[in-house]
Image (spheres, grey):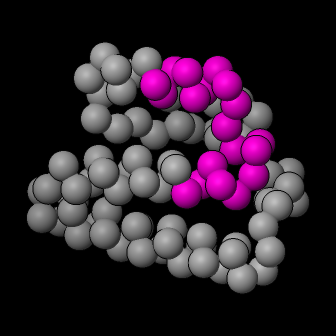
């Protein structure tokens, strides 16, 4: 359902997907290098990009939970089952 709701033109979608692939490569390198600071930064950047694909990727509840966790000191978080709900 989320993939069908992606509200981007072909060029913009390809650009976002390219950014996602780049980040995946950087995350792998950060883990290989045991550099968790870069890994955290990439996780957060990926989430920002992912939310641009569709308004169904996240909702106010998940965004508030992410903000709360960042305020509480969490450096990054992964949302599972994104799109219309999920958990952190």
Q: Position of residue 85 (x, y in %)?
A: 70, 30
Could one spot residue 65 in this view of the protein? yes
Magenta span: 49-67
Q: Is residue 21 magenta?
A: no
Q: Position of residue 17 (x, y in %)?
A: 59, 73
20 in relation to 38, above or below: below
74 in relation to 83, above or below: above
Q: Which residue: 35% across, 56% down?
A: 42
Could one spot residue 87 in this view of the protein? no
In which image quadrant can residue 32 be found?
A: bottom left
Q: Which residue: 82% across, 61% down?
A: 7
Q: Which residue: 39% across, 22% down?
A: 69
Q: Which residue: 47% across, 56% down?
A: 46
Q: Is residue 65 magenta?
A: yes
Q: Would residue 6 be found to the left or right of residue 85 on screen? A: right
Q: Would residue 19 be found to the left or right of residue 75 on screen? A: right
């Amino acid at each position: 359902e989320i993939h069908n709701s992606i509200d981007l033109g072909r060029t913009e979608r390809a650009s976002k997907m390219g950014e996602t692939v780049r980040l995946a490569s950087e995350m792998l390198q950060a883990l290989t290098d045991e550099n968790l600071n870069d890994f955290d930064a990439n996780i957060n950047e990926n989430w920002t990009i992912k939310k641009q694909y569709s308004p169904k990727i996240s909702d106010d509840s998940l965004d508030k939970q992410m903000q709360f966790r960042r305020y509480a000191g969490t450096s990054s978080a992964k949302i599972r089952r994104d799109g219309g709900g999920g958990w952190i």
